[in-house]
Image (tube, rainbow, N blue to C red):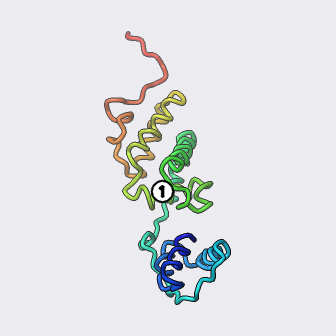
Amino acid sequence: ATKIFVDLNNNTNNADNLPKLMHDYNQIFWDKILTFTELYFKIQIPKFERPKKIPKKKFSKPLKDFSYEYEDILKTNRKIGQEFIKLLHDYRFDKVNPANLEVEQLFYPKKLYNYLRNHHWEKGIPPDFLSKWVQKIDTKSQTSENDLLDFQIIFEKLKIPIAYLPEINEENKPRSNTLHKPI
């Protein structure tokens, strides 16, 4: 609103520059933005020619649906899936501007995962996120061999190399929960 007001004052009520100023906003909100500007600054915005449709640079390619990955994670191991969801929300809180998310993406983990895979993790889930995920499982409770095997299954389904995770590589085979005494 302030940009519009300043531009109109500097250009003596010439509205030719308005489409350029408003290109960051979805056109369905233009009327609301202009009405707010008029009411807030008590000005009259002149009529201007609106472009038919301004292409959005951000969304030039179609978004992929990664729901199957999310569902594979949850179906494979409930405990691992719950930690994954918690880390998704932590990641969103730390690294994603909430203004870029739709309301559903804020509260539904599957939709958040799809957003992250399309906008932040195009090349796959980052190794540091994966390491935190494994560490959370390992520190929260004793990790069973089944948990580590489930991680391997999940990584195979998601085509994530096991080498990214030192916790699961050959040097650190899953430990059993029983103590072995030498014979």
| Percent position of residue 27, x then y | 55, 78
Residue at image position (58%, 87%) is 46
Closer to us: 173 or 66: 66
Residue at image position (32%, 33%) is 170
Q: Secondary structure at mark 1?
A: helix
| Percent position of residue 161, x then y | 34, 46
**Mark 1 surroundings within 10 Å by alpha-carbon count, few (fewer than 14), some (14 through 19), many (20 or more):** many
Residue at image position (58%, 89%) is 47
Which residue of the protein is positioned furthest toward the top in this rendering? Answer: 183
Closer to us: 10 or 91: 10
| Percent position of residue 164, x then y | 34, 42
Q: Quadrant of the N terminus?
A: bottom right
Closer to us: 65 or 11: 11
Q: Quadrant of the C terminus?
A: top left
What residue is pinned by disc 1?
Answer: 116
Left or right side of 99 for 171: left
| Circle 1: residue type | Leu
Vertical placement of 21 versus 121: above or below? below
| Percent position of residue 173, x then y | 37, 30
Badge count: 1
Vertical placement of 37 versus 66: above or below? below
